Amino acid sequence: MNFKDKVVLVTGAGRGIGRAIALAFAGEGARVAINDINPDTCEATAKEIVASGGEAAAWHADVANKLAVQTMLIDIEERWGRIDILINNAGVEPHKSILKLDEWDWSRTIDVNLKGAFICSQSVGRMMVDKGGGVIVNIASIAGRAAGLRDRSAYVASKTGLIGFTKECAREFAAHHIRVNAVCPGVIITEMTAQLRQDEAQLKKWLEDIPLGRLGEPEDVTGVVLFLCSDAARYVTGQAINVDGGKVMI
Ligand SMILES: NC(=O)c1ccc[n+]([C@@H]2O[C@H](COP(=O)([O-])OP(=O)(O)OC[C@H]3O[C@@H](n4cnc5c(N)ncnc54)[C@H](O)[C@@H]3O)[C@@H](O)[C@H]2O)c1
């Protein structure tokens, strides 16, 4: 999988899965635009890539803010001329029961996880149409395939919506040579799952349900993302692929 000189934008790449995806693309020769709302972690990922001989730069836009995203995209286009691959990875996950979830938490989750993917896909999609094609991968979740995550209603709704949005994008963008797929991770060891992993009873239950018998590492997700962005997947679009050790088999 050679991505030499491809320009890749990864949102939420300051840490966790997004950071691992950014490092993986850089390792395959891509120029990586690192986005994260946290300027420190965003810069840190870009510096790590540059220090190991790769090409990267950081932009700390909020993906839910259209103006901030568009400003970032103008800057990336001025620097590298185009975006070949977009990875919509930025996400948030409030843990509250429906009875306690306030409207702000609901709206922010939908805004970042779903509207953010729409804003980036629309704006980057327009650039890709002008340049003759591209690839988009949305990092959804098995929470969007088979609900049942306690206290995660806004998150489950956003990821279910993201899988639906992926299919609509794939259908509409196909005529412009843009493929769009979703990757649905299971429980991956990142800050996002720290609370779940501290709950021994819940962790035991999860592990019993994972045929491969372990939680995932961010690097377990990167191979599938790179495959979907490569020519090896040139006939694959509109799919949602689970990367969860076999927990969900649909
Ligand atoms: N970790 C898991 O088990 C798991 C499972 C399924 C899906 N996912 C999804 O994978 C993606 C990455 O998750 P992670 O585990 O690495 O989470 P994480 O919390 O470690 O990282 C998410 C990153 O997104 C950034 N971010 C949040 N809001 C943003 C915004 N508005 N604009 C730009 N950046 C923003 C954060 O600053 C953070 O660096 C998320 O979409 C998440 O829902 C994670």
Image (cartoon, rainbow, N blue to C red):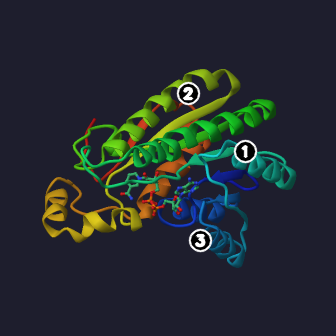
In-front residue for pair 204/85? 204
Q: Is residue 169 left or right of residue 108?
A: right
Whether tag 2 and tag 3 are in contact, CB under 8 A, the answer is no
Residue 222's spot in the image, x, y percent? 49, 57
Q: Amino acid at mark 2?
A: Ala
Quadrant for residue 31, please give it: bottom right
Q: Residue at 56% x, 22% y: name it.
A: 171
Give SS at disc 1: helix
Classify mark 3: residues with Cα within 10 Å, few (<14), some (14-19) or many (20+). Answer: many
Give the camera-side residue of 53 and 194: 194
Location of mark 1 (residue): 67
Residue in the picture at 47% in, 40% down: 182
Check disc 2 and report the residue beneath it: 170
Answer with mark 2 or mark 3, whichever residue precedes in sequence: 3
Specify the label residue 41 is tagged with.
Answer: 3
Q: Is residue 210 above or below residue 215?
A: above
Residue with the most extreme right position = 78
Position in image of residue 160 (x %, y %): 38, 35
